[in-house]
Image: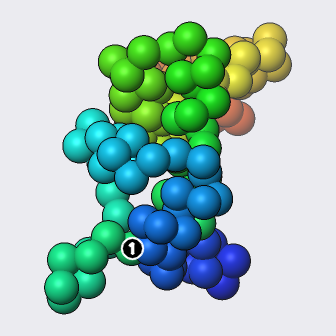
Amino acid sequence: MKEKELRRSMAVFTIGTVMKLTDLTARQIRYYEEQGLVLPQRTETNRRMYSLKDIDRLLEVKDYLNDGLNMIAIRRIYEEKANKQQKPPEKVEHSLTDEDVRRILYQEILNQSSFIPGDKNSWSR
């Protein structure tokens, strides 16, 4: 993980600081946590600690709500993003050219027959 990404993942903000940065109430932030939209780390004393990524996510959720999406739609968006990140990249299919097809066909003919180019007796086998 790159240092920038590592720093953005460090949980260093308390809920009070997050409230000021996001203009959300503590109840709203806890509700989004209940919904699985943000997962703050906990200290030994069970205090919530948020990272910059968590703050970005809360602001994004706030924007989605302002755009008229409901919680089900927002959760679905994040589930789809998580699924895309877990899937291996799909193979890109390349179209075969006529030359590719001829070469493959030629190789198959050679493999299936006992024809050896340059051997005069290979046709009679």
Residue at the spot 45% in from the left edge and 47% down from the top edge: 25
From the viewer's side, name the closer residue of 70 and 17. 17
Q: Is residue 77 left or right of residue 48?
A: right
Q: Is residue 93 left or right of residue 74?
A: right
How packed mark 1 is, by other alpha carbons closer than 10 Å (few <14, some 14-19, many 20 or more), is many
Residue at the spot 56% in from the left edge and 34% down from the top edge: 62
Horizontal and vertical percent position of residue 35: 27, 37
From the viewer's side, name the closer residue of 15 and 51. 15
Which element is circle 1 on?
strand
Name the image quarter holding the N terminus.
bottom right
Residue at the spot 63% in from the left edge and 30% down from the top edge: 63
Q: Amino acid at mark 1?
A: Met
Q: Is residue 82 above or below residue 99?
A: below
Which corner quadrant of the image does residue 39 belong to? bottom left
From the viewer's side, name the closer residue of 108 and 62. 62
Residue at the spot 60% in from the left edge and 60% down from the top edge: 20
Q: Is residue 87 left or right of residue 115?
A: left
Residue position for label 1: 49
From the viewer's side, name the closer residue of 60 and 94. 60
